[in-house]
Image (cartoon, grey):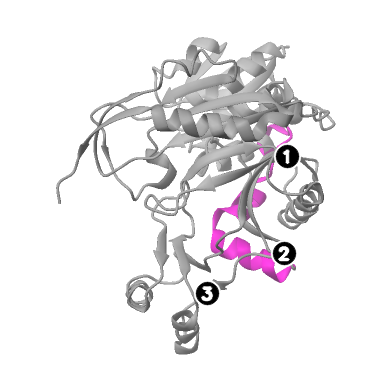
Amino acid sequence: MARVFVSIGAGAQQLPLIEAARRLGFSVAAIDRNPAAPGFSLSEHSFQCSIAKPATMRRMLAELKSEIHGVAARSFGPALLSSSALCRAFGVPGPGPSSVAFFKNKRRFKQTLVRAGIQCPRSFSWKSQFERNAIYEAGDLIARPAAGFGKMNVRLLRELSDKRALLDSIDDESILLEELLENGTELTVLGASHQGTYRNLLITSKVISNEPPLFAEIMHRYPALVPPFILREIEGIVQRIVTLSGLATSPLVTEFIYLRGQLYLIEASPEIGGEFLADYAFTAVTGQSYFDWLVRLLTEDRMPEIPAATHAAVIRFLLPQEGVLRSVQFPDWLARSAEFLFEKVLLSPGKQTSLQRGNLERLAAFGLSSSLDSIESLVGLANHAAEETRINYEISQP
């Protein structure tokens, strides 16, 4: 009987996962509602269906008369819920639907963590006048959708008038309102849980934008700018989150701020994550494919060995303006450099860009890698390449 790995989605971002499953000897069953999805051409079995319909997908997969060994989605939201439901239906390792739901609403999720003693930025409710007064008297605040993603629709509230306008227009169930933690080191953590045991895979420190688009990631660097003992502390904190959520077997991405000797949890989601960390940085740092490792995590009875880091890596992004993008041209020398990993233009020419869509409208990205002891020169090279990238923009008129 064929050993089948199920890809929830067959778009371009699923291709590394599909290719990894095939390298490891699995037949791939890909599901996507787009009949032209590129992953279908790499899959032995193709099903056209919305990935938000797990019951329909289950019936389709049952017709294969094959043994399902693993299921994965690279997306978030409905795709993760569908993936977890199919894992349960076919009895294969996965996060569990209740665990995925645990992470869905950032506001309620963080309230649970704080009650368990995990440190997060101070958050606020405004159901009473007393609570409103506390907000008015607090310092700078960040407001974002409780179920949002990608740093979209994030607002920085510095003025009293901004705070009052927010509180008068939106209920406190739909918004996560937190204190702004400034001048800390921001960290992104790729990790994974296997049968409830958590391990870090890759931890980067990052530079974020302090102008619109607010808090969009500009750069990730490995090794991270924190002491080694902090990396071990992160692993302990995330293990507690895994235990609280009941997360069984799943990738897990978390974000922290390290400030004045303290770690504050900012985000957590049981997903593969983006930022080109899985696609390029993990492979550059360890010499091994992240997606091969992930397929093994989801199909084997123990967590695969985590490869040791041997190289440094930098992922650099270019941010948008308000206007119409005409072209992005990287410097000619970039692709010829010994440190080069990749370069990608992320938006098509003619795109009208906005400063309200966070990470989703960054213009371009590139990656560099070299020896572990050369991280600072690598960062300098990345910034130099960003400065020399030519961006042609038609600026919006006021």
User: Of callouts 1 and 3, which one flags the residue occurring earlier in the amino acid sequence?
Assistant: 3
Quick one: label 3, few (<14), some, or many (20+) residues within 10 Å?
A: many
Highlighted magenta segment, given as a residue range: 88-116
Residue 208 drawn at (x, y percent): 50, 48
Closer-to-camera residue (216/146): 216
- Give the residue drawn at x 70%, y 27%: 285
Disc 2 marks which amino acid?
A: Ile
Pointers 2 and 3 in contact (C-beta within 8 Å): no
Q: Which residue is mark 3?
A: 124
Q: Is residue 380 left or right of residue 88?
A: left
Residue 89 lies in magenta, yes or no? yes
**Element on which disc 1 rests:** strand
Disc 3 marks which amino acid?
A: Phe
Against 61, residue 245 (above or below) is below
Q: Which residue is mark 2?
A: 118
Q: Which residue is mark 1?
A: 192
